[in-house]
Image: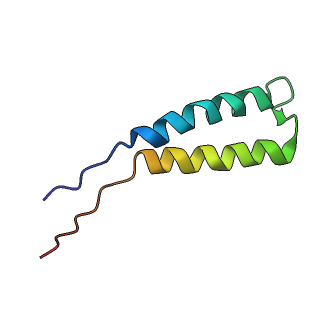
Amino acid sequence: MKNKIGFNLIFALLSFPIGLALLREFDFETFTFRKTVLGFLYLITFIVTIYLTFKKKTNSTDQ
């Protein structure tokens, strides 16, 4: 069987406001975060939610 890429709607809905908060926290004039720790926290959670949104589905019946 082919490996299918899954799409999880819940994580997609979570990644949208996290991405918006990440954009608000990033200063495009100096290319830095306004609050560094908070910016990295937003970035890490955004990457994790995007990964979990498009995570491949595994077969539970590998016989």
Relative to 21, 32 lies left or right = right
Outermost residue to the front: 10
The x, y position of residue 5, in whole percent, is: 30, 48
**Quadrant that contains the N terminus:** bottom left
Residue beneath the point at 68% across and 44% down: 43
Relative to 11, 44 lies left or right = right
**Quadrant that contains the C terminus:** bottom left
Residue beneath the point at 81% across and 32% down: 31
Relative to 32, 14 lies left or right = left
Number of numbered labels in the structure image: 0
Give the color scheme: rainbow, by chain, secondary structure or one colour.
rainbow
Relative to 53, 22 lies left or right = right
The x, y position of residue 28, in whole percent, is: 79, 25
The x, y position of residue 44, in whole percent, is: 66, 50
Residue beneath the point at 55% across and 38% down: 14
Q: Is residue 38 above or below residue 32?
A: below
Q: Looking at the rendering, which quadrant does residue 61 occupy? A: bottom left
Residue beneath the point at 87% across and 29% down: 30
Q: Is residue 3 above or below residue 24?
A: below
Q: Is residue 1 above or below residue 35?
A: below
Outermost residue to the bottom: 63
